[in-house]
C-alpha cells in the first residue's frame, strides 16, 4: 500500500469509518493486568501506562476510566511524517466544539471522539472529504 503525502489528496480520499465499539482511556501502574485488557492502544508515560480499551473491559476489570469515545479510522494510507493532514481535519471538529484524541498508526490515523457525538464527527469528516474531493476535481 503506497502512502499518500499530499494533504489535499489525503483529505479528499480519507474515507472515515466509525467503529462499533465504545472505548475509554485508562491509566495503569501494574503491567500484570495488561494481558487481560487487550488494549487498542498502549502508551508508556512517566506516571504509568495509558490504555485505550473497550468500555466493557474496563467495567469488567473495575478500572477507573475517562472519555467514553468511539474510534473513527481515516482509511487512507497516511505516512507518519505527513505534514498538514490532521491539521486540516482537527479544526473541522473543533468548530463543532468537539474534543478529539488522534492516534497515528503505521498505516492510518485514528480519531477518538466523544461517543455521544460520534455520528456528528463522522458526518463532519465526510463533508470535509467531499469538499476536498470536489476542489481537486474542479
Image: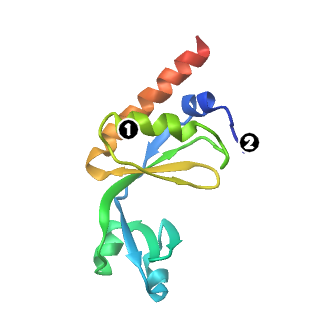
Q: Give the side of residue 98 with respect to residue 112, left or right.
A: left
SS at circle 2: loop
Residue at x 48% of width, y 85% of height: 31
Which residue is most to the front? 46
x and y, in percent, of residue 64 in the image: 29, 75
Q: What residue is shown with label 1? A: 93
Q: Is residue 46 above or below residue 115?
A: below
Residue at x 37% of width, y 53% of height: 70
Image quadrant in which you'd find residue 85: top right
x and y, in percent, of residue 138 in the image: 58, 10
Placement of the N terminus among the 4 image quadrants? top right
Q: Give the side of residue 28 with respect to residue 75, left or right.
A: left
Image quadrant in which you'd find residue 82: top right
Q: Give the side of residue 79 with respect to residue 16, left or right.
A: right
Residue at x 38% of width, y 33% of height: 124
Which residue is most to the top? 138
Which disc number belongs to residue 76?
none
Q: What residue is shown with label 2? A: 2
Amino acid at each position: 500500500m503506497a502512502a499518500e503525502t499530499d494533504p489535499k489528496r489525503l483529505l479528499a480520499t480519507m474515507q472515515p469509518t466509525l467503529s462499533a465499539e465504545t472505548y475509554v482511556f485508562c491509566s495503569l501502574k501494574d503491567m500484570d493486568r495488561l494481558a487481560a485488557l487487550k488494549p487498542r492502544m498502549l502508551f508508556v508515560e512517566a506516571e504509568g501506562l495509558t490504555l485505550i480499551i473497550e468500555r466493557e473491559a474496563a467495567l469488567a476489570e473495575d478500572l477507573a476510566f475517562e472519555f467514553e469515545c468511539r474510534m473513527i479510522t481515516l482509511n487512507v494510507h497516511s505516512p507518519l511524517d505527513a505534514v498538514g493532514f490532521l491539521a486540516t481535519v482537527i479544526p473541522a471538529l473543533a468548530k463543532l466544539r468537539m474534543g478529539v484524541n488522534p492516534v497515528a498508526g503505521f498505516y492510518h490515523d485514528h480519531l477518538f471522539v466523544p461517543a455521544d457525538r460520534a455520528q456528528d464527527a463522522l458526518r463532519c469528516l465526510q463533508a470535509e472529504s467531499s469538499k476536498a474531493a470536489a476542489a481537486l476535481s474542479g
